[in-house]
Amino acid sequence: MKNSEIWIAFYTILIKEIRRFTRIWPQTLLPPAITMTLYFAIFGNLIGERIGTMGGFSYMQYIVPGLIMMSVITNSYSNVSSSFFSAKFQLSVQELLVSPTPNWVILVGYTLGGVARGLLVGLAVTVLSLFFTHLALENIVMTIVVVLLTSIMFSLGGFVNAIYARSFDDVSIVPTFILTPLTYLGGVFYSIDLLPEFWQNVSLLNPVLYMVNAFRYGVLGVSDINVYWALVIVSLFIVALFSYGLRLLNQGKGIRN
């Protein structure tokens, strides 16, 4: 394919993915915003007043970055996993595979569609959080880089999940039994400094911890871990997931059989 044709194919996939979730925004964008508002009201205002400060900030300020990242992670992941599996289920993905569109264009198009939804939901949650507390960006570059890389990583993860999924139930297995526990145990609601040393070391095995803390560092300037290690870890995951997803796509794993 010519470069112009590749660009048209990529643009078409991306716009299709964006229109897919914006067309049904009451189902894709509104529920996460309402859920996060409940978190702000219950955990931040009601429970937070009894907890006091954490990391030198009010409890509400401390958990907001983690809740924003949680919304970005879940929506980036779910958008790609549900979209690509639906294309498999409806057999419309076959049209892409028999076309001259390179597989990497298909992968990037779906991934950036998930990134678009994740960032849009994250922005909405950030705006809502301003009604409950004040946020001051300490490092805007770190904030943008971390949220972008995290969204890319989990969009790729959603793509891999969709390839292996054989039913709609399979699409929800990873978010329910892996993604949700890792997110809740990833330092969203607490500092790992509060944990015994053994559990602090166990928490360091959780990749979500690095993303949440790196984003919290960008917003508040505090972190439980080395934020630059977080960028390295997320980047390695992105490379690994992109390579693996492209390999599965090239092999037709879960698609042609």
Image (spheres, rainbow, N blue to C red):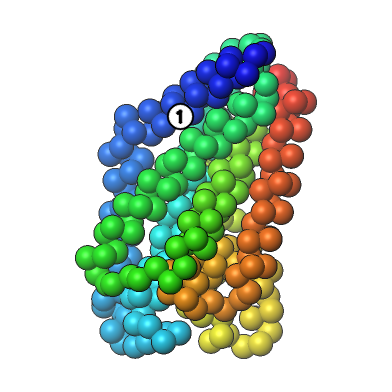
- Displayed quadrant of residue 159: top right
Q: Position of residue 41 (x, y in %)?
A: 26, 69
> In terms of image quadrants, where is residue 16?
top left
Which residue occupies 37% across, 49% down?
Answer: 121
Q: Amino acid at mark 1?
A: Glu
**Horizontal arrangement in the rendering, residue 54 relative to residue 24 (left or right):** right
Q: Which quadrant holds the N terminus? A: top right
Q: List x then y, in percent, for residue 237.
A: 69, 52
Image position, residue 85 (x, y; %): 55, 30
- Is 94 situated left or right of 217 in this image? right
Please tell me whether mark 1 sits on a helix, a strand or a loop. Answer: helix
Residue 246 is left or right of residue 79, and the answer is right
Work out whether 177 lies above or below 226: above
Question: Do we see residue 254 in this rendering?
Answer: no
Circle count: 1
Indicate the position of residue 97 as horizontal and vertical percent values.
Answer: 65, 16
- Nearer to me, 13 or 89: 13
Closer-to-camera residue (185/97): 97
Residue bearing the label numbered 1 = 17
Residue 15 appears in the rendering:
yes
Residue farthest to the left, as pictured: 131
Please determine whether, in this image, residue 182 is positioned above or below residue 203. above
Residue at left offset 72%, top offset 20%: 257
Q: Is residue 144 above or below residue 39?
A: above
Q: What crowding class fits label 1: few (fewer than 14 Cα within 10 Å), some (14-19), or many (20 or more)?
A: many
Q: Residue at x 71, y 46 (%)?
A: 239
Residue drawn at (34%, 88%), measured in percent from left and top?
52
Residue 50 sits in quarter = bottom left
